Amino acid sequence: MACLDRRDLGLFVLRVGTGAVLAAHGTQKLAGWFGGGGIQGTTAAMEAMGFHPPKHSAFAAGLGEAGGGALLALGLATPAAGAAAAGAMAGAVAVHAPAGFFAQGGGYEYPAFLGFTAAAIGLTGPGRYSVDHATRHLFNQPWTVALAFAGSAVAAAAVVGRRAKGRVAADPDAT
């Protein structure tokens, strides 16, 4: 019997834990589970935070978190999952940045941690105990890493930039 690889086991625990947290957070946005606002509440929140169009932003954030988190937990299409979750968290970081770093003051500490963790898993790969490994890494190729992270970075920059531009147009004193 083969010995368990501690690195693969550790990556499995990190991947499943991070993915589950992200998936739960995203289902709050999409379905209203776990005390969330559902798509209607999230749409209203997105509008109040300056994301336009708010309903598209609500779906994108919810899918990036719930979908990316579920895929991370499974270890399926890990580069795309990590990139999607990291991109969604970039939007959350932009919202929380004016409050500073620490979460206790409403800062961006928590979404930044989730985003960096998701990105690190997406870049590192899922490890041996994953659906990607079982499918011989069909969706975990070097080109998918580059494509997923480039696409996520462009999308996150566009969304965050559009929000910032809209906030400045609405209130020149806004940051």
Image: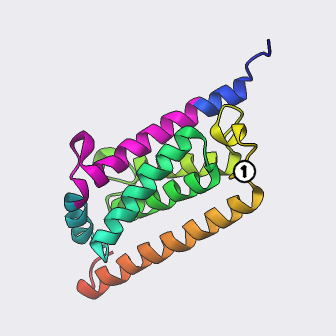
Which is more toward the observer, 165 or 74?
74
Residue 3, above or below 57: above
Q: Position of residue 140 (x, y in %)?
A: 70, 51
Q: Could you say whether the residue bearing mark 1 is in a helix, strand or loop?
A: loop
Indicate how the structure is coloured in the image. rainbow
- The residue lying furthest to the bottom in this view is 169
Q: Position of residue 58 (x, y in %)?
A: 32, 64
Q: Which residues are magenta?
A: 13-39
Query: In this image, 114 relative to 125: left or right?
Result: left
Query: In this figure, which residue is indicated by the disc labeled 1?
Result: 138
Q: Position of residue 144 (x, y in %)?
A: 69, 60
Residue 143 on the magenta span: no
Residue 53, above or below 122: below
Q: Residue at x 27, y 50 (%)?
A: 31
Quarter-of-image position of residue 169: bottom left
Residue 158, above or below 1: below
Quadrant of the image containing the C terminus = bottom left
Quarter-of-image position of residue 61: bottom left
Decide if residue 34 is in sight here. yes
